Image: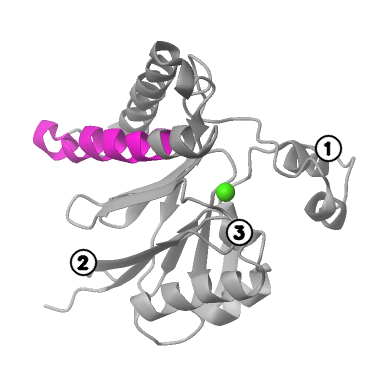
Amino acid sequence: MSTAVLHYAAAAVTDRGRKRPSNEDAFGFSVEHGIYLVCDGMGGAAAGEVASSLAVDEMLRLLSSRAEVDNGASQMPQLAEDAICTTNEAIFSRSQRNYKLNGMGTTLVGLLVEERRVWVLNVGDSRCYRMRNRSLEQITHDHSLVEEQVRLGRMTRSEAIRSPLRNVITRALGTQSRVTPDILELEVEPGDLLLLCSDGLTRELTDPTIESLLGTDLPLETRCGRLVDAAKKAGGHDNITCILVSAGPDKN
Ligand code: CA
């Protein structure tokens, strides 16, 4: 196995879409600290924006200070879980203090990168995908009512896509005093491309369409832009956000 150091690069785009009056998605990343986050807020325009941007800011703040304490890879899942719980409490207590923000919440999908290892953090129905050898694979499981029905064999995939309950998520950040995140660990290979996105992308585009739009050698920014443009062309019913993170051999 190659021991070459991986060189990460990232690009992100967010767009209001064509139907919504505001953008309740938020994103943030730091290549230097190996943190990448997409959040999709809910609870009505102002509240949704507050929840998603608060989540991104808190998570970036909490996780980027980790280098100073030198936790080591074995402690990363606990570190990530602690950051998510603290962020959850911050959003929840803010919504309790201000009645206009009652009930606000947000999804969270994120990556925490440490050399070749990546921890994928997930709450809600924003998604992480991995492109490897031009083949797209969904890494996260949606925390949604229809996904649970599909996994229990009570609903087919195509029924889930058409269901009037497809928007109902079963986990969110900030809506309750406690939250249970999914934290998965991946081993990154040179050439891997990771995509984080809100459901405004995945409701408009099928996985094969996303795969073909990503499967080019165009710059990351261009590929991000093409994903968002395609989702808008397909309807743009919701806010659309995506972050692409590529892992290449170190250029030095
Ligand atoms: Ca959304």
Residue indicated by mark 2: 5
Q: Taking 22 as reference, is 2 above or below it?
A: below
Residue 142 picture quarter: top right
x and y, in percent, of residue 245 in the image: 36, 65
In the rendered image, which quarter is residue 231 located in? bottom right
- Numbered disc 2: secondary structure: loop
**What is the secondary structure assignment of the residue under circle 1?**
loop
Mark 3 belongs to which amino acid?
Answer: Lys
Residue 249 position within the rendered picture, expressed as x and y whole percent measured from the top left: 25, 75
For marks 2 and 1, give the CA distance: 41 Å
Q: Estimate the x, y position of residue 130 in percent, counting from the top left.
A: 50, 63
Indicate whether residue 23 is drawn in magenta. Answer: no
Give the residue at mark 3.
19
Residue 65 falls within the magenta-colored stretch: yes
Q: Earlier in the sequence, mark 2 or mark 1?
A: 2
Specify the amino acid type for callout 2: Val
Apparent side of residue 45 relative to residue 158 in the rendered image (left or right): left
At 15% from the left and 35% from the top, the residue drawn is 65
Q: Is residue 234 visible?
A: yes
Question: Residue beneath label 1, please?
Answer: 152
Number of numbered tags placed on the structure image: 3
| Magenta residues, start to end | 51-70
* Side of 31 relative to 233 (left or right): left
User: Which callout, 3 or 1, points at the residue further toward the start of the chain?
Assistant: 3
| Mark 3 secondary-structure assignment | loop
* Image quarter (top left, top right, bottom left or bottom right) of the N terminus: bottom left
Say above or below: 163 vs 242.
above
Q: Residue at x 39, y 48 (%)?
A: 26
- Pick whichever, 28 or 191, lies toward us: 28
Say few, some or many: other residues with alpha carbon within 10 Å of mark 1 (under 14 / 14 to 19 / 20 or more).
Answer: few
Q: Are marks 3 and 2 in contact (CB under 8 Å)?
A: no
Q: Quadrant of the C terminus?
A: bottom left
